[in-house]
Image (cartoon, helix red, strand yellow):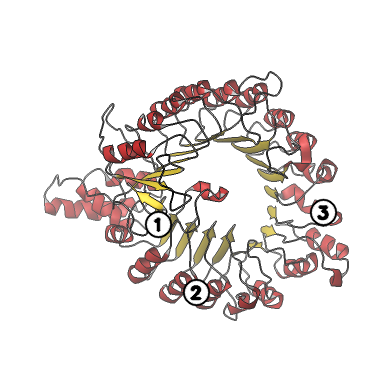
Amino acid sequence: MIEDDDQWWSPDNSTNPQPKPDAAAADPPPQTSSPSFDLVLENVLENVLCFLTSRHDRSAASLVCRSWFRAEAQTRVELFIGNCYAVSPARVIDRFPRIRAVVLKGKPRFADFNLVPIGWGAGFSPWVAAMAATYPWLEKICLKRMTVADADLFLLASSLPCFRDLCLICCDGLTTAGLAAVAENCRYIRSLDLIENDVEDDESEVVDWISRFPPGTTCLESLVFDCVGCAVNFEALEALVGRSPSLWRLRVNDHISVGRLCRLMSRAPQLTHLGTGSFSSFEEEGDFQNSLDSAFNTFKSLVCLSGFRDPVLEYLPAIYPVCANLTSLNFSYAIITPEQLSPIISSCHNLQTFWVLDAVGDEGLEMVAATCKKLRELRVFPLDATEDSEGYVSDIGLVAISEGCRKLQSILYFCQSMTNSAVVTMSKNCQDLVIFRLCIMGRHRPDHVTREPMDEGFGAIVKNCRKLTRLAVSGLLTDKAFSYIGKYGKSVRTLSVGFAGNSDLGLRYVLEGCPNLQKLEIRDCPFGDAGLVSGIHHYYNMRFFWMSSCKITLKGCNEVARRLPRMVVEVIRDQPEDNCDSVEKFYMYRSLDGPRNDAPSFVNIL
């Protein structure tokens, strides 16, 4: 839904509650004053509303009366659409005539784990066709989990003469041909950021997109292509960097060696954000240790460092001179031992964001806790994500972080074992947590010391961390854990659950107890039709609800669809010929325009 963060009351115990009004695209409130007065008021409001930058504040303002509704629409220049199927392009264009920037999201987040079948939908084509014809002044588009065809990028680049910023996150369908169209035709491009997209061309079809940027000085400020799987024309890249004096962010792919990285750094000493690429040398290039040392010694403005996709660890000392200024460091691709991390992290006193593989072990996390007192976000990814893998981090590392990094606001922590005591300690030491995602990779694993369920640990998190808006739970959990979430998780907006719970009562606790819940993702849990139906009163207030490999049936899904006609209920089959009553994948979301018309054969819209 376009405005997904506003709070609405819904009728209690109603079997068929009414949908909450959508501030961005719903019908306007009833007329309350004379036309002449409205005209004067709208003129005043348009000047006042220009100072409202929060989409939530603007949404609230648009619901006051018809005049405010019209004035807000006329002054809106930025649009956020959390689900591309929640509203049609036609409705958006009719409602907002002056949009200059659009954020559009597509597939459910579980698509990142290959749980959404290929070809499910979320195509960008209808959106770009509508916007290209209506918003010729459009400057910025950010897409997440959308299918973006090269033809879409051709149309965008040829139809939007003022276009400046393109950000694609976790998208698929595009190739270097589409990137070439953007580079060549968007002459005022300011940022081209490709983040975790699937950009893989056949070797014979790769297009030299880097050389398509116009000659002369560019407006480029940000260029991110670390996800592009093919090599780029390095000479063209070096020239592009050299004639982009405003470039502050550059993240290259793993086809860029340290020798080439040094040359890029010498061309752009103004960079503040750098993605290093492979951080290794090609055999024919020789050793670049001295050049690398010199490059980083002169890079005094660097605050964000990432890349290291295939690093030669002997080159790591080269980054020591910039560590003291870093606020963000990403080692999520580098296998680094505690000994190798120590001299780096010991200088990172200003670090606020740190991503790392669990190869650093509990010892490495203890070093982080001892030094990084300003840390706000920590992500610890698994070197081996299989269930029976050897875990490198545990409750010891989590406790160390909680004791040393008291300003922590967001944590993603993959591990093989955990204790309630460690999670309780974190809940007491880091009460400013907004995001807590603990992923115990082995299924149904209890507290590895007491062998008790992990109920008390997660209960402490929702009880003590009052600012918590996003929670992911794992390990052995009973319905008691969900009772805690329902009782104390009043601010939780996004909840992800896997391999947990005893019965439908657990799901009921959450749906009845979390009034601000917007996004609910559940997989491999024993929840069935009774649990599903228990949330009827709340579903109109949610952006989406995903369930897979649970115990719901087609009968239960049909019941929800019947009682909530303004919700779209999709049943997704892994096999087109699968006609059994059990439902493998269930996806429900709000929509102002009803069911979509591009559903593939394996999607049944109830």
Q: Earlier in the sequence, mark 3 or mark 2?
A: 2
Q: Is residue 573 left or right of residue 21?
A: right
Badge 2 vs badge 1, beta-carbon distance below 8 Å? no
The three-letter amino acid code for the residue at tag 1 is: Ser
User: x, y percentage for residue 50?
Assistant: 35, 54
Report the residue marked by disc 2.
186
The three-letter amino acid code for the residue at tag 2 is: Cys
Classify mark 3: residues with Cα within 10 Å, few (<14), some (14-19) or many (20+): some
User: x, y percentage for residue 400?
Assistant: 73, 30
Q: Is residue 340 left or right of residue 309?
A: right
Report the residue marked by disc 3.
316
Q: Earlier in the sequence, mark 3 or mark 1?
A: 3
Dot 2 lies on which element? loop
Badge 3 vs badge 2, beta-carbon distance below 8 Å? no
Q: CA distance from mark 2 to mark 1?
A: 37 Å
Report the residue marked by disc 1.
601
Badge 3 vs badge 1, beta-carbon distance below 8 Å? no
Pick the residue in front: 434 or 383.
Answer: 383
Determine whether 78 is above or below 163 in the image: above
Quadrant location of residue 273?
bottom right
Q: Nearer the viewer, mark 2 or mark 1?
A: 1
Pick the residue in front: 496 or 502.
Answer: 502
Dot 3 lies on which element? helix
Pick the residue in front: 368 or 373.
Answer: 368
User: x, y percentage for residue 475?
Assistant: 61, 30
The three-letter amino acid code for the residue at tag 3 is: Leu
